[in-house]
Image (tube, rainbow, N blue to C red):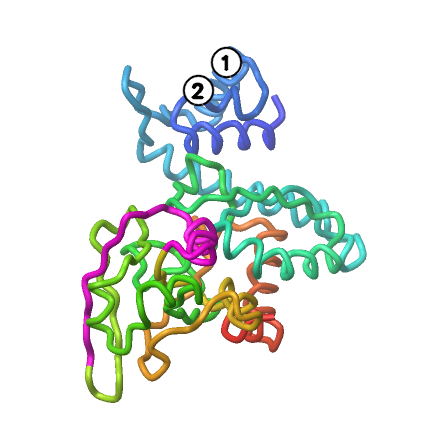
């Protein structure tokens, strides 16, 4: 049996958690996946997986074999592309996950430049506002905006993102304009449903203040909340990269301009520092470079 294919099958079994899931991912029969696994164990001279009715787990020999298989796949990719011209050398599929607002306002600009540089790299975008499981969803790279990363995540910081409190002139004409953060407690504030009761944090000089806000509409997508805010439904906290065009046109008004909101970090999340395909390494390096440039700063913090 082909050792590279066997290595691919073994890695996929581990990533997907079962032989059936690996067969579906690889478009193979379950029997063929089982044959490759049996051959891997024959070559290793040891059992590589603990099998139970509920889950699979690696044996010590399996952990060693997984590392060697990952090394083999990287070497195979490097050999395949080593004699091709720069730019044309990278090819294949990358699955990238991000939120809708970040994707449409910023990331698509960056990915267009990346694919002009590497035209043979295909990108499959996975749009989600949830914290995706990279292994289960087969995501190569996730972009996340957050105040704090969970422990043990592998991430590269790309940029910081600023936010703005805003409302439509129509809403402010009906309900009045909040002049202090505590005034927001009396307003209809549109919040993110997965945060529960929202606390909005403000800083003015040395003073810090947290205000508990609520309203009659919440959601898990900032683009939908932005549309509701523009329609006059209430007050919301929005990333500047989404709100700035509407602020510039007068469809939204920025509130509490003398107060600062906490900056959020923008991170690239991935599964391994050591075992990365050449195309993933190229995308990571490109994003670090691009988000460090003027175009990203303009889109993220001052708008188009």
**Quadrant including the N terminus:** top right
Q: Residues within 10 Å of mark 2 (few under 14, many from 20)?
A: many
Q: Element under label 2?
A: helix
Residue 187 image offset from top left, x and y in percent: 26, 62
Magenta stretch contains residue 219: yes
**What residue is drawn where x is 60% and y is 45%?**
94
How far across and how far down the image is residue 4, in percent?
A: 60, 32
Q: Residue furthest bottom?
A: 205
Say which quarter of the image contains residue 76: top right
Q: Are marks 2 and 1 in contact (CB under 8 Å)?
A: yes
Quadrant for residue 202, please give it. bottom left
Please give the label number shown on residue 97.
Answer: none
Above or below residue 173? Residue 125 is above
- At label 1, counting other C-alpha atoms closer than 10 Å, the crowd grade (few under 14, some 14-19, many 20 or more) is some
* Element marked by disc 1: helix
Marks 2 and 1, how far apart at CA: 6 Å
Identify the residue position indicated by label 1 in the image. 30
Residue 36 visible within the image: yes
Residue at (26% x, 88% y) in the render: 205
In-image side of 275 versus 112 (left or right): left
- Left or right: 86 in relation to 163: right
Q: Nearer the viewer, residue 197 or 287?
A: 197
What residue range appears in magenta? 208-233
On screen, residue 86 above or below 46: below
**Badge 2 is on which residue?**
19
Q: Earlier in the sequence, mark 2 or mark 1?
A: 2
Give x and y (percent) for residue 89: 75, 52
Which image quarter: residue 73? Answer: top right
């Amino acid at each position: 049996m082909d050792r590279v294919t066997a290595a691919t099958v073994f890695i996929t079994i581990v990533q997907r958690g079962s032989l059936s899931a690996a067969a579906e991912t690889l478009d193979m029969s379950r029997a063929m996946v089982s044959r490759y696994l049996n051959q891997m164990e024959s070559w290793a001279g040891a059992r590589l997986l603990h099998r139970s009715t509920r889950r699979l787990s690696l044996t010590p020999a399996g952990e060693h074999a997984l590392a060697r298989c990952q090394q083999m796949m990287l070497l195979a990719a490097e050999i395949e592309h080593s004699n091709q011209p720069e730019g044309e050398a990278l090819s294949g599929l990358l699955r990238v996950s991000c939120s809708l607002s970040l994707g449409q306002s910023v990331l698509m600009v960056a990915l267009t430049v990346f694919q002009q540089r590497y035209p043979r790299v295909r990108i499959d975008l996975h749009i989600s506002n949830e914290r995706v499981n990279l292994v289960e969803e087969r995501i190569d790279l996730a972009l996340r905006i957050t105040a704090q990363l969970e422990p043990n995540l592998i991430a590269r910081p790309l940029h910081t993102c600023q936010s703005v409190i805003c409302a439509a002139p129509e809403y402010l004409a009906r309900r009045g304009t909040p002049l202090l953060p505590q005034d927001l407690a009396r307003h209809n504030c549109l919040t993110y449903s997965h945060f529960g009761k929202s606390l909005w944090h403000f800083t003015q000089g040395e003073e810090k203040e947290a205000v508990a806000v609520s309203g009659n509409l919440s959601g898990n997508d900032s683009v939908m909340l932005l549309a509701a805010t523009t329609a006059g439904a209430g007050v919301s906290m929005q990333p500047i990269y989404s709100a700035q065009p509407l602020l510039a046109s007068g469809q939204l008004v920025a509130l509490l301009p003398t107060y600062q909101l906490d900056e959020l970090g923008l991170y690239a999340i991935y599964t391994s520092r050591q075992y990365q395909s050449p195309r993933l390494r190229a995308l990571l390096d490109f994003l670090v470079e691009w988000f460090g440039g003027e175009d990203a700063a303009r889109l993220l913090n001052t708008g188009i």
